[in-house]
Image: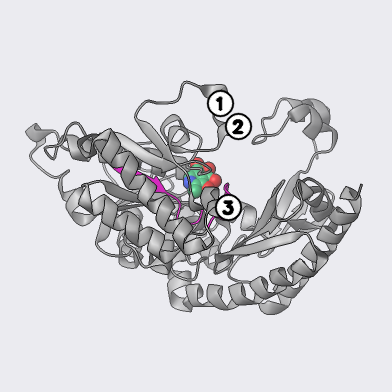
């Protein structure tokens, strides 16, 4: 690296997400190159990126088709005046995305990140009800353990305590329920547990008065809660409850979208169509920031009218839907659709799951869960993940590690031989973590 500031000083002036920078600066991980399944640090050490950045690089890093599309767009236009119009490439992206969404979810506003997409969906549902004869519907029900983003609305919808408490008070009008995992010990089977957790959502809506509740938002598979994977029936019950009480159902598919659960969307994997989808991460495979809020056709139509009606969506961001990002998004969607990569996600998912199940022989794994290549492993011993995070990096594999579980979601360009290497690195790291954690 070049520059005149000592590296440790420079790092202390940098806010890496959620890190204590005094610690980080002593032993920093600084990346400088990425290609396909791998990232390299500034010392040239290679890491198998088993979570594609952070559930982003669904086609791996720097996919040639995406790079080419961006190079072409770089030569034409990278920004257009957002208060005056849109661009041809933004419209092409909206058309492509609308072709792969479930049901009639075709009204689309592109953004630059998942938090923006979630934030927009929260504002959208409030404005929708206000101009559709139900101005009192503003509350949003979401789940503890969920994560929807870092901005105030998205954070208020999130249910991860440590990421929120420093910023209290949260926004008003956000109500919480527990995900099915919270009741696991109280039921003899997972199906009953899911039924109970889904019906708890109706209890909240009814007790709050449905005329005050605008939406339910949840991740179909929740990462921060430990790859919480409800039953299909859970989503069917939620759908029925939302319909019964005229409450909109928002799926936050920022992680689960774009093929990784075995369908283009987790909505299809679980067989339930929401009213809105928030998409992000995989939509540009990490090439450039891109996300989208996607709404059901008739909801979108409520925003069409005469200028004097002032029903247009009162929302925007400077970089939202910029042409460079949209060019990347088009290439990602084309690649996923042409290669039917969601089908490959099922095949690869079966391969990885079998290997992760095999880790149970070491006596520290209680459950493997998830769908497609989005898989989580829960430990039966507390805090093993603390050591695993260290040993995984030593061995050159990047995982999403929590004290009590870890997750993988490798890019869909991987083949079984690549995954063989990834799983071997994970097993080696786990065995070392067990050794290091031994009393
Ligand atoms: C499910 C979910 N929703 C929203 C977000 C926020 O996305 P971003 O970090 O791009 O703002 C995240 C980020 O991890 C997420 O996992």
Inter-mark Cα distance, 2 to 1: 6 Å
User: Which residue lies under the disc numbered 1?
Assistant: 165
Q: Which residues are magenta?
A: 214-228
* Mark 1 or mark 3: whose residue is earlier in sequence: 1
Q: Residue at x 68, y 53 (%)?
A: 405
Q: Residue at x 31, y 67 (%)?
A: 99
- In this figure, what is the number of numbered marks? 3
Q: Give the dominant element type of the magenta stretch: helix, strand or loop.
A: loop
Q: How far across and down, in percent of the image, does residue 118 sit?
A: 40, 42
Q: Secondary structure at mark 1?
A: helix
Q: Are marks 2 and 1 in contact (CB under 8 Å)?
A: yes
User: Which residue lies under the disc numbered 2?
Assistant: 162
Q: Is residue 200 left or right of residue 35?
A: left
Give the number of the disc on residue 221. Answer: none
Inter-mark Cα distance, 2 to 3: 24 Å
Say few, some or many: other residues with alpha carbon within 10 Å of mark 2 (under 14 / 14 to 19 / 20 or more): few
């Amino acid at each position: 690296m070049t520059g005149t500031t000592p590296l440790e000083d420079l790092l202390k002036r940098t806010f890496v997400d959620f890190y204590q920078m005094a610690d980080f600066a002593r032993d920093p991980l600084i990346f400088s190159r990425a290609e396909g399944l791998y990232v390299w640090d500034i010392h040239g050490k290679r890491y198998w990126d088993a979570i594609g950045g952070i559930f982003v690089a669904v086609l791996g890093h720097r996919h040639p088709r995406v790079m080419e599309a961006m190079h072409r767009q770089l030569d034409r236009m990278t920004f257009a005046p957002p208060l005056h119009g849109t661009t041809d490439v933004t419209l092409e992206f909206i058309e492509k995305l609308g072709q792969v969404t479930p049901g009639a979810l075709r009204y689309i506003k592109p953004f630059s990140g998942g938090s923006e997409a979630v934030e927009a969906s929260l504002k959208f549902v409030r404005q929708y009800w206000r101009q559709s004869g139900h101005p009192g519907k503003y509350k949003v029900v979401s789940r503890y353990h969920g994560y929807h983003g870092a901005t105030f609305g998205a954070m208020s919808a999130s249910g991860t305590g440590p990421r929120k408490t420093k910023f209290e008070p949260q926004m008003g009008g956000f109500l919480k329920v527990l995900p099915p995992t919270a009741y696991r010990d109280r039921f003899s089977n997972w199906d009953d547990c899911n039924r109970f957790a889904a019906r708890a959502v109706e209890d909240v809506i009814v007790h709050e008065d449905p005329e005050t509740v605008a939406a339910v938002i949840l991740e179909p598979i929740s990462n921060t809660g430990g790859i919480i994977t409800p039953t299909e029936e859970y989503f069917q019950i939620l759908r029925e409850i939302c319909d019964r009480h005229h409450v909109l159902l928002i799926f936050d598919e920022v992680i689960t979208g774009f093929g990784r659960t075995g369908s283009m969307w987790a909505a299809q994997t679980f067989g339930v169509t929401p009213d809105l989808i928030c998409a992000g991460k995989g939509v540009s495979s990490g090439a450039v920031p891109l996300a989208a809020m996607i709404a059901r056709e008739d909801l979108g139509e409520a925003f069409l009218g005469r200028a004097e009606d002032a029903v247009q969506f009162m929302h925007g961001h400077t970089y939202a839907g910029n042409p460079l990002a949209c060019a990347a998004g088009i290439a990602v969607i084309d690649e996923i659709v042409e290669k039917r990569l969601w089908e490959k996600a099922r095949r690869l998912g079966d391969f990885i799951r079998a290997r992760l199940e095999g880790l149970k022989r070491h006596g520290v794994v209680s459950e493997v869960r998830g769908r497609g290549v989005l898989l989580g492993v829960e430990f039966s011993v507390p805090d093993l993940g603390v050591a695993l995070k260290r040993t995984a990096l030593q061995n050159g594999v990047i995982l999403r590690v929590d004290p009590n579980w870890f997750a993988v979601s490798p890019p869909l360009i991987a083949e079984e031989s690549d995954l063989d290497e990834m799983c071997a690195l994970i097993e080696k790291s786990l065995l070392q973590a067990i050794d290091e954690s031994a009393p």
